[in-house]
Amino acid sequence: MSDEKPYRRLETQALLQQIAFRHGLEAMNASEEGNLAWVTSGFPVEIPFAMNVFPTYPEQAGAIIGAQKIGPEVCGYAEDMGYTQELCSYAMVSIGSTDRPDDVPMGSLPTPQALLACNNICGTVLKWYDGISQMTGAPVYLLDTPPLEGDQTPHHREYVRSGVERLVEFLSTTFQTSLEEERFREVSELSSKAIHLWTSALKECQKSPSPLNCADRFLTMAPVVSSRGTEHCVEFYEALLEEVQDRAKQGIGAVREEKVRLLWDNIPPWFALRFFNKLAAKGVVFPADTYTHAWSGAVEGTDTRSILDAIVDIYSNVYLNKGLDAKVDKMCQLIKDFDLDAFVMFSVRSCKRYSLGQYVSKEIVTERTGIPGVVIEGDMVDSRLFNEAQIETRIEALLEMVT
């Protein structure tokens, strides 16, 4: 990439592509061998990994479809089946690509033998996976994590713990496997190490200039979502952290001339990541975002019981499973820790759980931090709902307030 570009490409990007290719091959092999599970992004994958069940993610496949700019077309396949455009576009492209896999070569997933859903991220996942179950014959297991307001209570923890124990039974029966403590401890240690490396890389962005922009993080978060619990995931984040720390030590920023530091809230528009590079030309960098910081809970324990306890705590307390106060607190803390000038909230039509309350949150965050924010609207996969000119106008107005 030319030196004239306003942003810098990560050297680790080549390794990321290798991991993505490897994951695809392993998923196809697992499907052929009869041990592939589709999982939601907030699912405790340490358990299936430890039980030799390979997990793959329809949300990541949806992000790929979005990045290929074929989201409207693949959503259209689901619309042809009678589904409405108002549904989650991740679900829409998942259903559409499952119905017509030959038309979506890079975004369709191999046939699953089980569908593992956790509703800590949204409630759509159950009906979504029910639809996929009807199409593939794969059974669905739902790990139910009721939303939290405040601290997790003992009865809440006990309820989720019983669901985790039933999950182990479901996998044991479905795949004729078992949860061995030594393997479980090994997977949880690798998962925790990857999480610690990832969060260390994120923390480096507190420095100015920020060594990573949010587009960098949206891409490099993929292994910690899909492959935590594996050695190659740890190796990737060791390489990433080394590169990020080296940038920080030398004062090298992701954006060549950093002028304004913003916070991003919500999932990105996968088809328009170049949008962040256009802003980089104005000296705009996003050192922090609520999305990639959501994968920060390390599963740690010394035996099966303590690891399961950690899983219950972490996966019940994910960002989207909490009330509005927790989200506001998170944004305010990121603004303080990363010394940010303003914030952008992306109201994603598809992700109602994430976008709920953003207009109220915007006013509260500004009141508490003293910095301005703006709400822009669109979708993460379906570009028909993304008006880039309108969005640029709103962000330009925000920049005028802080420059």
Image (spheres, grey):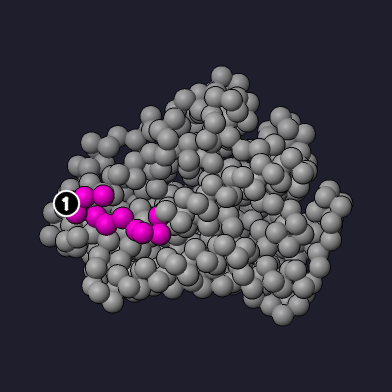
Three-letter residue code for mark 1:
Glu
Q: Give the magenta range.
A: 1-13
> Residue 176 versus residue 321: which sits nearer the camera?
176
Residue annotated with mark 1: 4
Which residue is farthest bottom?
A: 302
Measuring from the top left, give residue 338's x and y in whole percent. 31, 71
Instruction: Tell whether 115 sits left or right of 71.
Output: right
Could you tell me what secondary structure mostly forms the magenta stretch?
loop
Tell me, yes or no, if residue 189 can be seen here. yes
Instruction: Tell whether 277 sits left or right of 216.
Output: left
Q: How many marks?
A: 1
Instruction: Tell whether 369 sits left or right of 382.
Output: left
- Membership of 28 in magenta stretch: no
Quarter assignment of residue 403: bottom left
How packed is label 1: few (under 14 Cα within 10 Å), some, or many (20 or more)?
few
Q: Residue at x 13, y 54 (%)?
A: 400
Measuring from the top left, give residue 258's x and y in whole percent. 19, 63
> Residue 240 versus residue 219: which sits nearer the camera?
240
Q: Residue at x 30, y 34 (%)?
A: 387
Tell me, yes or no, if residue 262 can be seen here. no
Measuring from the top left, give residue 312's x and y in whole percent. 68, 67
Rendered position, 376 above or below 49:
above
